[in-house]
Amino acid sequence: MYYVTVEKTFDAAHYLQGYKGKCEKLHGHSYRVAATLSVRKLDDTGLGYDFTELKRQLGGILDKYDHNALNEVPPFNKINPSAENIARVIFDNLAPAVKGEANLVSVEVWESPTSHVLYKP
């Protein structure tokens, strides 16, 4: 089994409704997102999945969040834009875009260099 991972970043603001603490106020993060696929076989060029294609697919999802207030962007206008929810939403949007025999295994979201969430269904 091979695991193929790409990382991309985006900058956005958010606040957490119902949270008691600093995060209930509007604040921003430079988010880092990693998406990991699993593949069993390599193609004729020796690739499990093209990094460029996976970055393009992930970037297409992240573009709508970049430099926005996440609480105003669906589905985060209805659910809290916590790192946990962000990771699950990205996973749910990216999984159908993955081509061939690859499978999306996980999405990780960092809000800071020392705090992150790993989502694996």
Image: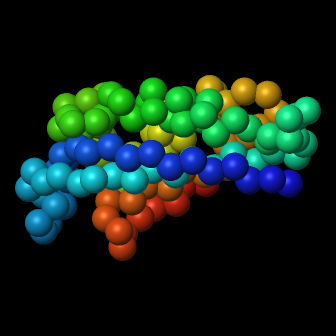
Q: Picture coordinates of residue 13 (x, y %)?
A: 18, 46
Instruction: Name the side, left or right, on which 97 lies relative to 89.
Output: right
Instruction: Name the side, left or right, on which 64 lies relative to 29.
Output: right
Residue at 72% x, 27% y: name it.
99
Q: Is residue 47 above or below residue 75?
A: below
The total of numbered circles placed on residues is 0
Residue at 41% x, 64% y: name it.
116
Instruction: Name the side, left or right, on which 110 lies relative to 26.
Output: right
Instruction: Name the side, left or right, on which 32 lies relative to 5.
Output: left
Query: Most extreme residue toward the front, as rendered?
Result: 45
Residue at 67% x, 30% y: name it.
98
Question: For residue 113, which quarter of the picture?
Answer: bottom left
Judge by depth and name the residue closer to the eye, 84 or 104.
104
Question: For residue 75, which quarter of the picture?
Answer: top left
Q: Picture coordinates of residue 65 (x, y %)?
A: 30, 34
Q: Is residue 120 above or below residue 92?
A: below
Is residue 84 at least partly visible in the picture?
no
Q: Picture coordinates of residue 82 (x, y %)?
A: 32, 53
What color scheme is it? rainbow
Residue at 45% x, 39% y: name it.
89
Is residue 3 at least partly visible in the picture?
yes
Judge by depth and name the residue closer to the eye, 116 or 63.
63
- Quadrant of the image containing the N terminus: bottom right
Q: Picture coordinates of residue 59 (x, y %)?
A: 45, 33
Judge by depth and name the residue closer to the eye, 102 or 118.
102
Query: Most extreme residue toward the bottom, as rendered?
Result: 114
